[in-house]
Image: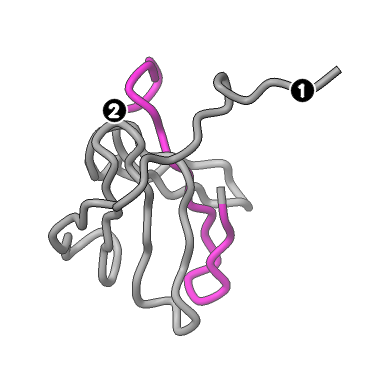
């Protein structure tokens, strides 16, 4: 989840198991009212999200397809997803040395 200071909204990635909103999407949340905006489908299993310095582009990693998605002026323009060269590390694969 991240806060966009330009539009004063929270952005949250929603995985495929979601039941309250459309899965495999990103939604906006108004922090003052708690209202959830329209879900925008971005691809398989969005996880980490980041915002460009000027607030115009939103990047999301898609762990289900090993891609990076860029959305310009969210939610209006989805750009093509770029395949990542290295699969992302999944938390369940990390174990502590004891």
**Secondary structure beneath disc 2?**
loop
Task: Indicate whether residue 53 is drawn in magenta.
Answer: no
Q: Position of residue 19 (x, y in %)?
A: 38, 15
Residue 94 in the image: x percent, y percent? 63, 25
- Does 39 sit left or right of 88 as displayed? left
Viewer-proximal residue among 71 and 9: 71
User: Can you tell which mark lies on residue 85?
Assistant: none
Q: Position of residue 37 (x, y in %)?
A: 37, 45
Residue 5, position as x, y percentages in the image: 57, 73
Residue 4 located left or right of residue 61: right
Mark 2 or mark 1: whose residue is earlier in sequence: 2
- 2 or 1: mark nearer the eye: 1
Does residue 28 lie above or below 73 as drawn?
above
Q: Quadrant of residue 98?
A: top right
Q: Residue at x 46, y 67 (%)?
A: 51
Disc 2 to disc 1, C-alpha distance: 34 Å
Specify the farthest residue to the right: 98
Residue that mark 1 sits on: 96
Query: Badges 2 and 1: C-beta atoms under 8 Å apart?
Result: no
Mark 1 nearby-residue class (10 Å; few <14, some 14–19, many ≥20) = few
Is residue 71 shown left or right of residue 50?
A: left
- Which residues, given as a range, are shown in magenta? 2-23
* Residue shown at 26% from the left, 48% from the top: 67
Scheme by which the image is coloured: one colour
Q: Element under label 1?
A: loop
Q: Which residue is mark 2?
A: 22
Residue at horizontal 48%, vertical 61%? 50
């Amino acid at each position: 989840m991240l806060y966009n200071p330009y539009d004063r909204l929270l952005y949250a990635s929603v995985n495929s198991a979601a039941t309250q909103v459309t899965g495999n999407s990103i939604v906006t949340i108004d922090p003052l009212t708690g209202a959830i905006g329209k879900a925008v489908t971005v691809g398989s299993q969005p996880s980490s999200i980041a915002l460009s310095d000027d607030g115009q582009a939103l990047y999301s990693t898609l762990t289900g397809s090993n891609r990076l998605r860029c959305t310009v002026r969210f939610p209006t323009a989805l750009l093509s997803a770029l395949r990542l060269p290295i699969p992302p590390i999944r938390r369940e694969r990390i174990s502590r040395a004891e």
